[in-house]
Amino acid sequence: MRANLPTTALVLTIVATAVTVTLAAEFQKPVTQWTCAEFLSIDDEFKATAVHSAMARAKSGQAAVSDIKDIEKLIPQIIGECTKAPEATFWARLKDEWKKTGAETGG
């Protein structure tokens, strides 16, 4: 069975919102202000959601419809870059890696 794009986008938005609320309680700042160390500290299963959430926040709180395959490619790249420089900002690493995909990040 193949899910349609609006349903997939809605599900991702709901999950991203739930995880953002959970993570916000832990870090007390927006995902776009995290350090790489903070990003690396979250469970691996939530990293894709954190990336999606950051993209949504960058687009003025609107749901970001991102290609899941692009996000899946970004995660190991961001982890690699953040491991090299844990004090760097997660958002800067995300933007740098996202630009390499040719997509727009917003903010």
Image: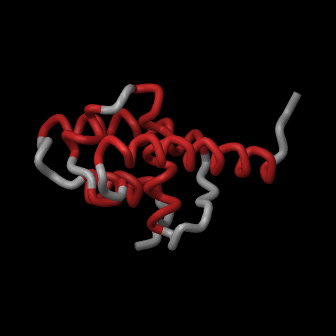
Residue 25, image x, y percentages: 37, 45
Image quarter in which the N terminus is found: top right
Who is closer to the viewer here, 57 or 22?
Answer: 22
- The location of residue 6, given as percent across then percent down, is 80, 53
Q: Nearer the viewer, residue 102 or 11?
A: 11
The figure's colour scheme reads secondary structure
Residue at 40%, 42% in the rendered image: 23
Task: Tell whether 103 sits left or right of 107.
Answer: right
Residue at (40, 37) in percent of width and height: 75
Residue 28, position as x, y percentages in the image = 30, 52
| 23 versus 107 height, above or below | above
Rendering quarter of residue 77: top left
Q: In which quarter of the image is the C terminus?
A: bottom left
The image position of residue 89, as x and y in percent, is 21, 55
Q: How many marks?
A: 0
Does residue 69 lie above or below 105 as drawn? above
Q: Which residue occupies 56% across, 43% down?
A: 18
